[in-house]
Amino acid sequence: MTYLEILDLHKNQLNGSIPPDLGNLSKLQYLDLSQNSLSGIIPSSLGNLTKLTYFNLSSNKLSGTIPTAIQGYGSYAFIDNPFLCGAPLDKPCSANGNGTLTPTSKKPKALRVPAIIAIVAAAVILSGVCLVSIMNIRARRKKKADVPMVIESTPLGSTDSNVIIGKLVLFSKSLPSRYEDWESGTRALLGKECIIGVGSIGVVYKTTFEGGISIAVKKLETLGRIRNQDEFEQEIGRLGNIQHPNLVAFQGYYWSSTMKLMLSEFVPNGNLYDNLHGLHYPGPSTSRGNSELYWSRRFKIAVGTAKALAYLHHDCRPPILHLNIKSSNILLDEKYEAKLSDYGLNKLLPILDNHGLTKFHTAVGYVAPELAQSLRLSEKCDVYSFGVILLELVTGRKPVERPTANEVVVLCEYVRELLESGFASDCLDRSLRDLVENELIQVMKLGLICTSELPSKRPSMAEVIQVLESIRNGLES
């Protein structure tokens, strides 16, 4: 199959070794063998695949040294292989070349008194650790007994007592626990005057309970690939356990045969798009947004969003891809700190095909080319979208603008052309009160790297955070 360009076999429970003959697929551009049970060494013949733009062998049982020719794909391509060693992993190889200690053939020496004392002390410490662990497990079980709260009654907002019973699940103890509070609250909620936004999967409302507690409620209009209540509860329940200061917290959900709702934290200062460009303003957007969004705040928004994405990509197991990042999905709290919304909802999005991608990507200009052209999903799609956000923050412009009926300006192309022509400063949003030109240009260059055409040339989100921190620290020093 020498004309094959894409080979995706990830998560198929494959075992055995990687066939060296894969190195003969000279036109291969995309190779994903991750999340299997493949073992043995990595064939050096894979270094012959010079056209690869995506390469992933992570989460297998491979062993030995990583061949030099493929080390350039970075550690992400090889992680979760306990017996792999050498660059780019932070795990040196031992003499036997497999990252493990070589057993010695010497006979063990007789234990001396100090060794016996150390063993006894270790046993006592281990017993203490076990006791503490048991107590922690009991405490966690007691905590889990209270959360989430499950309330069953008639569908929210319904006065008909004969309809099928619905299920309300709450992840947060701060929310009202009486069903009557929810029923009266949502009767007032589901009206046009309570709408605060329209997302990719439904309309978003705001409701406030007694005591001043406000939440955002998304009424789902599509369930995408989710077929039944069990799948819905599994997906949303997983999101209820995710906590990060730069992620909008999920606080519960509601399911009935006639209505599906997602409950989340209410973030008061709206979204980044409206703050940058002004509400419902159709033309070029520079200097039309919120004057309170000065550069130091924009920089903090960039860092906060990057940390949220890095958490989803690197700290969640399995990693979570967002795939719908845009400035309207970045919400701002009362201190203008960023909170990323709509994460982990891939299965809820409308079923995609090559022609229907932009139906849910309502803000054209954020979508990575490999996702738009062939639906290749990877964390580098999110990196591309984040790069567009950086350019948006620096320039104050929308990702795509139409100055005239026959003219279209794509932000990435516009900035790249000016930078290559030596007019980088012409891109900057001159309405900024605390504009620091050198810092803005560095962030702009990072945005262009993140929006590289080839996914392999884009950094990881962990690397993006390091660059952003070095930009700010370099300026202060």
Image (cartoon, rainbow, N blue to C red):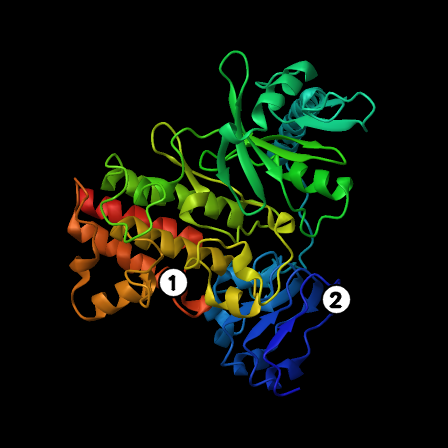
Q: Nearer the viewer, mark 1 or mark 2?
A: 1
Residue 185 sits in quarter = top right
Q: Residue at x 35, y 50 (%)?
A: 466
The residue closer to the viewer here, 67 or 363, is: 363
Residue 451's tag is 1
Q: Residue at x 22, y 45 (%)?
A: 287
| Residue bearing the label numbered 2 | 14
Q: Residue at x 51, y 41 (%)?
A: 198
Quadrant for the N terminus, please: bottom right
Query: First in sequence: mark 1 or mark 2?
Result: 2
Q: Is residue 78 above or below residue 241?
A: below
- Tell me if residue 93 can be seen: no
x, y percent for residue 430: 17, 48
Q: Secondary structure at mark 2?
A: loop
Q: Secondary structure at mark 1?
A: loop
x, y percent for residue 267: 44, 30
- Rounded to the nearest angstrom, the CA distance separating label 1 from label 2 is 34 Å
Q: Is residue 132 above or below residue 453?
A: above
Seen as rendered, the residue at the extreme top is 211
- Tell me if residue 136 can be seen: yes
Q: Residues within 10 Å of mark 2 (few under 14, many from 20)?
A: some
Residue 265's tag is none
Residue 261 sits in quarter = top right
Q: Is residue 164 left or right of residue 383?
A: right
Residue 2 sits in quarter = bottom right
Amino acid on which the number 1 mark rests in the picture: Thr
Q: Is residue 473 above or below residue 5?
A: above
The residue closer to the viewer here, 239 or 161, is: 161
x, y percent for residue 153: 76, 22
x, y percent for residue 335: 34, 29
